[in-house]
Image (cartoon, rainbow, N blue to C red):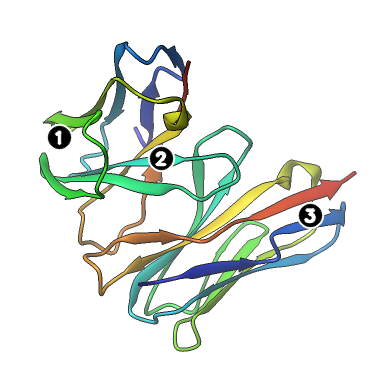
């Protein structure tokens, strides 16, 4: 069964810093990987979707990379802002188990003004 | 319209009550999903509907009963719930169940069982 892990579990940085969130998965047989943001008690907002054939995707200050063979993805956030404070979840769409979506454990980010 | 809309946003119900959660999307997505999320945990899949048919039931207790009346609407009927069922219930949709497309999530229903 696919296992998705995110490191670190929590991260606190001063405003303006660049930061990297990590996501690793155990089985490289995936269709895609999606990064989400979740504010406390709220739903998930999609940030970036990377197909298995792609190496990276960019949206504004966010850049996500995918190394499928090594089972890793990173989410790079440039010039962090207090409004970036949230929990970030990665999820992989597994092609072995009926296209099920497996979520990582999440990274709780706090950007200090 | 690029949203998944969930109602109500908050629900408090007694263990003998019957209530329903509603999820709606008008993006033409043919796969819809129910997830349950406990505090500080990732979402857990409950049900998958593909073309209005139940595709996956992740061994969810029968006190949760999903329904997909049409391609835009997904309901979750609740009956005789337990306090441990209190959680955030998230609905999501994607173009197809077996596609390369990502998921769009709703903002969730915060359910409290008393």
Residue contact at pointers 3 and 1, CB within 8 angstroms: no
- Residue of label 3: A80
Q: Chain of mark 1?
A: B
Under circle 2, the secondary element is strand
> Which residue appears at 25% of the width and 44% of the height?
B47
Quadrant of the image occupied by residue A80: bottom right
Q: Are marks 3 and 1 on the same chain?
A: no
N-term mark: 2 or 1? 2
The residue under the point 43% across, 77% down is A54
| Figure check: A61 above or below A68 | above
Circle 3 packing at 10 Å, graded few (<14), some (14-19), many (20+), is many
Q: Residue at x 21, y 33 (%)?
A: B62
Question: Residue A59 at x, y = what percent?
Answer: 57, 58
Residue B36's tag is: 2
State which chain disc 3 sits on: A
Left or right, B27 with respect to A75, comes to left
Q: Position of residue A31 (x, y in %)?
A: 32, 71
Rendered-image quadrant of the C terminus of chain A = top right
Q: Is residue B60 left or right of residue A52?
A: left
Crowding around mark 1 (Cα neighbors within 10 Å: few <14, some 14 to 19, many 20+) is many
C-alpha span from label 3 to label 2: 30 Å
| Circle 3: element type | loop
- Asked which secondary structure carries label 1, the reply is loop
């Amino acid at each position: 069964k696919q296992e998705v892990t995110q490191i670190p579990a929590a991260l606190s940085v001063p405003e303006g810093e660049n930061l990297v969130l990590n996501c690793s998965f155990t089985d490289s047989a995936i269709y895609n990987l999606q990064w989400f943001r979740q504010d406390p008690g709220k739903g998930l907002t999609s940030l970036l979707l990377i197909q298995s054939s792609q190496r990276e995707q960019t949206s504004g200050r966010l850049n996500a990379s995918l190394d499928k063979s090594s089972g890793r993805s990173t989410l790079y956030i440039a010039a962090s802002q207090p409004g970036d404070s949230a929990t970030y979840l990665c999820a992989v769409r597994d092609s072995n188990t009926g296209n099920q979506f497996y979520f990582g454990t999440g990274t709780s980010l706090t950007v200090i003004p | 319209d690029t949203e998944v809309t969930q109602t109500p946003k908050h629900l408090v119900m007694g263990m003998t009550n019957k209530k329903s959660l509603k999820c709606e999307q008008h993006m033409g997505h043919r796969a819809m999903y129910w997830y349950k999320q406990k505090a500080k945990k990732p979402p857990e899949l409950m049900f998958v509907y593909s073309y209005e048919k139940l595709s996956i039931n992740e061994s969810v207790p029968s006190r949760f009963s999903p329904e997909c009346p049409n391609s835009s609407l997904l309901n979750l009927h609740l009956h005789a719930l337990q306090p441990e069922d209190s959680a955030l219930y998230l609905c999501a949709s994607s173009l197809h169940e077996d596609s390369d497309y990502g998921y769009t999530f709703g903002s969730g229903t915060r359910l409290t069982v008393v």
